[in-house]
Image (tube, grey):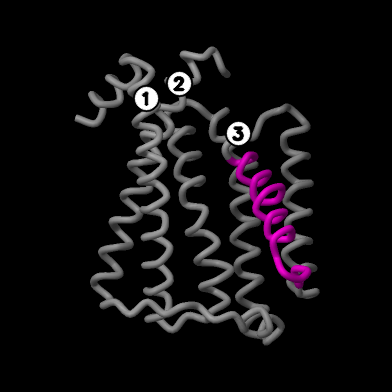
Amino acid sequence: MMSGVFTYIEQGPVWVSWVILAAAFAVLAKCADLFVDSAVGIAERLHLPKLMIGIVLVSVATTSPELSVSLMAALRGSPEMALGNAIGSVICNCGIALALCAVFSKTSVPVLKYAFRTAGGFLVFVSILCALFVGVDLTLSRIEGGILLLCFAGYLGFLVRQYKQGHMREVNEADVTEIAKPARALLLLLLVGLAGVILSSKFVVVTSVTIAKSMGVP
């Protein structure tokens, strides 16, 4: 059934793709919120440290829209869209989100020295590694992608170890709003949010490709 819907979108009028794209973005944003909120609620009930909730769980969950769109694009044979989405997300986070935070904040944005050394150092390392991988043959292979995933897993392990050793207690001071819902309700919301993110991402990819082809955009 879904394949028939996607076929209609690809072969139908372009205005249909625009409408579905707008609706898919709205559903994607709402389901991502559900996914993040329920994930945080479950983590709190499991008594996970706030560092794990904030830096690890929330940071990964909030990137679920970009992650899902990139995966769907790659699986549907549009790796260029996946690459553009990944690079565009980083540019928007650094060039828009971080910039607006500094512009509209009442005071200068404080940066913890230890967090800057660890997170900043890892970001620089991964950026250089990606440049080396792509700079050799202008491609990113499965092995190179696997190495990047191992680097990410290693970084998460490093954060957990540093937290247990008490080096990042100051990062753990920020309060996380508790979500007073039953565990079953949180699990249901988590599954609904995840399913919504995946499904809406498929529509985003299909409609985006259709619109791009109609405009002659690569």
* Residue 186 image point, x, y percent: 30, 70
Q: Is residue 210 rendered to the left or right of residue 182?
A: right
Label 3 element class: helix
Q: Earlier in the sequence, mark 2 or mark 3?
A: 3
Viewer-proximal residue, 84 or 149?
84
Membership of 90 in magenta stretch: yes
Residue name at image x 64 percent, y 72 percent: 159
Label 2 element class: helix
Label 1 element class: helix
Q: Which mark is residue 33?
A: none
Viewer-proximal residue, 29 or 80?
29
Q: Which mark is residue 17?
A: 1
Q: Earlier in the sequence, mark 2 or mark 1?
A: 1
Dot in front, 2 or 3: 2
Q: Is residue 181 rendered to the left or right of residue 166?
A: left
Q: Which residue is mark 3?
A: 84
Give the answer, above or below, for where 48 lies relative to 25.
Answer: below
- The quarter of the picture where the C terminus appears is top right
Write down the region rendered in magenta.
Answer: 86-110
State how far apart marks 2 and 3 are (Cα): 16 Å
Q: Which residue is mark 2?
A: 211
State how far apart marks 2 and 1 are (Cα): 7 Å
Residue, far left? 1
Q: Is residue 177 rendered to the left or right of residue 144?
A: left
Q: Earlier in the sequence, mark 3 or mark 1?
A: 1
State how far apart marks 3 and 1 are (Cα): 20 Å
Q: Amino acid at mark 2?
A: Ile
Classify 10 Å Cα crowding around label 1: few (below 14), some (14-19), many (20 and above): many
Q: Amino acid at mark 3?
A: Gly
Give the answer, above or below, for where 26 lies relative to 82.
Answer: below
